Amino acid sequence: MKKLGLLTLILVFILSSCTTIPKVEDINCDLTPEHVDCQTEEVNCELTPEHVDCQIEEVNCSVTPEHADCKVEDVNCLVTPEHAECQVVEVNCNLLPDHYTCEAEDILTCEDLGESECLFTYAEANADDTFTIIGTYKTLKLARKIINGSNNPNVVVLYNNDVVAMKYGVVNFKNPDPSQIIILGRPGFPITTYINGYYNVDAVFLYTDSIFTYGMISGVKFEVMTNDIQLIPHIQLNDTYSYYENQSGELYHYVSYDLESRGYHLLGPIDIAPNYLEEGHKYYSYDNRYFYTDIITMTDDLTNETYENSINYETPYYNYYQYLSFRSKTNYTAEELNTYLNSIVTQTSVLRDSGEQFINAQDNVFINAAMELSFAIHESGWGGSLIARTKFNLFGINAVDANPYDAALSFDSIEECIVYHTENFLQPRYFDPSYSVSFGTNFGNKNQGMNYKYASDAFWGEKIAGYYYRIDKALGFKDRNHYPIIILNPDAVGYYGPNTTSPIVYNPNEYTYNGLDIPFIIVRETTDFYVLQLPLAINEEFKMDPFKTMTITDVFYVEKDSGTIIN
């Protein structure tokens, strides 16, 4: 037994000496792709759809836009005209006039289609107030497409014999009833303004859509219900548009009040005429900043939201007296204002010898006495209106269009009226940027300023600015351009001190006029900031307070790239 065990051990030793464990060979499949270990297993996904190689990878192209599955195939239709994207889709342009393939000539008239009782007539306006019918269409959209594609400046669309769309012309607001106002919407801005067709007749026409007409008057691009106005084609106007003129170096504005009789209200002089306006020429401007010698050129520019074809494209006009803030001071004394007033007003005028009352308001409330006087001159008819003489109401306070005399407030003296007007009317309403009628502390126009909500006359601000200009001219131009004026960008913020870490005291996002360009006077400047006069006093919480007395120290700082200096 011992011999058997020994033989077994010897045998195991011999066998172990002859047998080795094979080493695993490292395979480089790039060198030996034919090696058995380099062969890829062929998977039949129809038989084994659950196999890992059969799973479809989900690609989020917003996360990995560079992924191969996210690439948009560029198709060359000249090479592969049979490609799906190269197939021409036949479009019925009478059903889809706004389709990108549809041109005006692709749209057929109802006559071409053999249809009758189409309501919208495409016609050419004639100078004698007649129309030459060209064809009819089922919808206004179809007819407007034809107008937009036409080079004829006199084409129109008629509905029940009224013009409801046209190429060029005016929006006529004419209304013999002074109590009726027309609400003007403003594209892109939530708060409406308004005008009175008794004072203002013409706005330049821009375009129409289904129920609205778009135009411009007194600086504002507006929308109005087409049913509320009249459209008059360019050729039928006999050149009765409102216009500006340079007369002996001064600027006058002829505002049309009757497009048929060619009647004009003459405003002016309202300012020194800009040197690019030549004497003896008519200049058209419905934004009051850029001037044109041709209505069609102006209309095309305004429609395309540019002024590049105006005569003063690089130098827009700003009437200093129209953009100056009430939060400024005149350089004239009470005696000088009296000298001017008494040379003009009658002995019965309540404005006679009233200069001291206006200077007192300037000292007590921080408002420009000459601006307040100009305001009173306009609203009271030089102190001679019935409301002024019997109620000492110089400003038409509460004298609404529907019932001006009975509704107007009464005062015991003009001094009481001025105090009320400045402290209880202007400051807490028109100067408080959070109040519903506040659109800047300047006279302005229908684009911005007090004119936006104070008066239904679109040129109310321009008229009062004209009175101030004439006061300044008569007394030696001590006020003109005394203050630099900056129009702030709509997103400009103002700080309590000369750094951007200082408390914000002016934030247009919180104000009624958010989104508009508002003018302020510059009282001084630092290296990086302009110092501007606030519209209201600041309280202890760094907030504007309409019930706190304003002083010259109520200012705010804006970075110098926050706006445009206009004078």
Image (cartoon, rainbow, N blue to C red):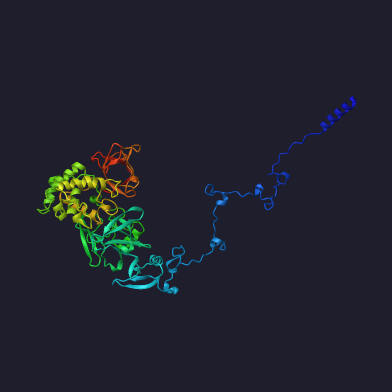
Q: Nearer the viewer, residue 2 or 119?
A: 119
Measured as percent of width and height from the top left, residue 523 is found at 25, 42
User: Looking at the rendering, which quadrant does residue 178 occupy?
Assistant: bottom left
Q: Nearer the viewer, residue 302 or 131?
A: 131
* Residue displayed at 34% across by 73% down: 132
Measured as percent of width and height from the top left, residue 249 is found at 20, 56
Q: Quadrant of the N terminus?
A: top right
Extreme residue toward the left, this view: 347
Work out whether 93 lies above or below 429.
below
Extreme residue toward the top, this view: 2
Q: Relative to residue 73, is residue 532 drawn left or right? A: left
Q: Nearer the viewer, residue 10 or 30?
A: 10
Work out whether 257 lies above or below 66.
below
Q: How many marks?
A: 0
Measured as percent of width and height from the top left, residue 90 is found at 50, 66
- Can residue 160 be seen at all in this image of the molecule? yes
- Can residue 249 be seen at all in this image of the molecule? no
Q: Relative to residue 22, is residue 304 drawn left or right? A: left
Measured as percent of width and height from the top left, residue 354 is found at 13, 48
User: Looking at the rendering, which quadrant does residue 6 occupy?
Assistant: top right
* Residue displayed at 60% across by 48% down: 57
